Image: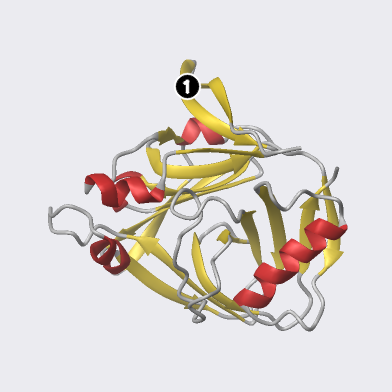
Amino acid sequence: MKSIYALVGTIAVSACSTAVTVPAEKQGLVEYYGAQKTIFDTGKAEGKVPIAAMSGSNGAYGVGAYEGLDGEITIYEGKPFVTKVRGNGFTMDNSTNGAAIFAAWTKNMAWRDEPIPAEVKTYLDLQRHVKARAAAAGIDTGMPFPFLMTGKPAELKWHINVDLTEGKPVTRELFAKSKANYVMQNEQVDIVGFYSEKHPGVFISAYAPAIKEKDVKNTIHIHLVTRDGKSAGHIDDLTFAGGMTLRLPKN
């Protein structure tokens, strides 16, 4: 059966007694709206997806870039984790205020757990492993799908968007520059991820710092939330040291 892009008329959720709506594309278990490439086409980083539209239920997981290049949005078990750079540090907000420039999310409630084997050590290893295990589980890898992870990576390199454009139109170069970079080691984290080979420039970045090979495409978008709930953001690279768990949707 060929892939079908179905335009969902309207997604409606209630937040603070006010209906929040956003049109969204849906494929399989993944819903998405807005596109990274639109930032470069327009030079603007406008909010398109209200955080309330991608959160609010226990089965909600999502990732997005905060409007105005002013932070990162991660939804874990329905709860928003919005980080913004302020001064020499960053803030954490769990409210549904604000919107994402682009985002992908799922409302899936059923997951199956399996250990990530020792031979998976790098970002690219993970990308290949997620596809292989999804295919083995009967998931159509030609369609986008969500996945989760939990455990203690040996090292995580991650960032939070911060607007460093100085009011200029957003280019790819300014977008790449507009980030505060961080590193953590051996910390317990929960990871929200989305896999797709067909959405580079939409909710999958066409470029990932961890992938050096010119002929290898990035196919994952992953965010972290530390178990203490104090840190969250976009993962650029990671190294495994065993003991991690992969969670894939149940068919």
Between 12 and 44, the one lying in front of the other is 44
Task: Give the residue at x 49% y 50%.
Answer: 203
Task: Give the residue at x 57% y 36%.
Answer: 55
Quarter in which the C terminus is drawn: top right
Q: Is residue 154 left or right of residue 10?
A: right
Which residue matches tag 1? 21
Q: Secondary structure at mark 1?
A: strand
In this view of the protein, can residue 152 be seen by the observer?
A: no
In this view of the protein, can residue 206 be seen by the observer?
A: yes
Circle 1 crowding by C-alpha within 10 Å: few under 14, some 14–19, many from 20: some
What sort of colour scheme is used for the picture?
secondary structure
Q: Amino acid at mark 1?
A: Thr
Vertically, is 61 above or below 153? above
Q: Is residue 199 left or right of residue 35?
A: right
Estimate the x, y position of residue 20 in percent, counting from the top left: 46, 22
Between 216 and 221, the one lying in front of the other is 216
Between 8 and 227, the one lying in front of the other is 8
Between 8 and 82, the one lying in front of the other is 8
Task: Give the residue at x 61% y 53%.
Answer: 196
Estimate the x, y position of residue 244 in percent, counting from the top left: 76, 71
Q: Is residue 22 left or right of residue 166?
A: right
Task: Give the residue at x 37% y 37%.
Answer: 98
